[in-house]
Image (tube, grey):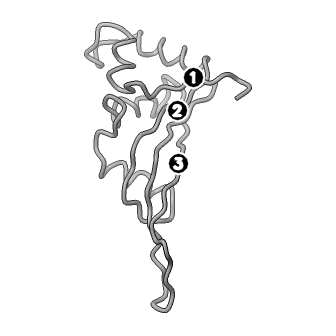
Amino acid sequence: MDARYAFRVRFRLEPAAADVSVAPDTFETTCSLEAAEPGTEGWLFFRDALWRGEVGDPAHARRLVEEKLPVPVENVEFAALHTDEEYLEALKAEIAADLEPFKADDVTEVLSKYFGSSLMVESADE
């Protein structure tokens, strides 16, 4: 079972010495964060951080990524949840077990509400 949240991240380099400069000083990359197994601590990250495939609180997302990367982060955009079929089925089952906190009628609505179209199911050989 495997899943990871992918974010597009823009960061900048800030030389530690005054006699050093860099050009360009801003870069973009993709940062992936491992998704917690459904039902375990942290599995509701998507509910707490995303809305319709967008980062709900950009300042919080920047701080989160800065904790993981040793650079000043200027911008974070959610790209996708990359998941295998096994993780997706476990996620759906966990959501279905208690729909009320999601304020939705079914699992499909929950996935759309939080991920938009940014849910990428990958086969085991990808």
Residue 71, above or below 114: below
Considering only order in the chain, which callout, 1 or 3, is on the residue closer to the N terminus? 3
Which residue is labeled 2 in the image?
A: 36
Q: Which amino acid does the dot numbered 3 rest on? A: Cys
Which residue is labeled 1 in the image?
A: 121
Instruction: Please name whichever residue, 66 or 6, is drawn nearer the observer in this view of the structure.
Output: 6
Considering only order in the chain, which callout, 2 or 3, is on the residue closer to the N terminus? 3
Q: CA distance from mark 1 to mark 2?
A: 16 Å
- Return the x and y of residue 109 as percentages of the image width and height: 34, 13
Q: CA distance from mark 3 to mark 2?
A: 16 Å
Residue drawn at (53%, 42%) of the image: 33
Which residue is labeled 3 in the image?
A: 31
Q: Quadrant of residue 34?
A: top right
Q: CA distance from mark 3 to mark 1?
A: 18 Å
Q: Which amino acid does the dot numbered 2 rest on? A: Ala
- Return the x and y of residue 75 as percentages of the image width and height: 37, 54
Q: Residues within 10 Å of mark 2 (few under 14, many from 20)?
A: some
Secondary structure of residue under mark 2: loop
Secondary structure of residue under mark 3: strand
The number of numbered discs placed on residues in the rendered structure image is 3
Q: Nearer the viewer, mark 1 or mark 2?
A: 1
* Residue extending farthest left: 103
* Residue extending farthest right: 125
- Return the x and y of residue 106 as percentages of the image width and height: 35, 8
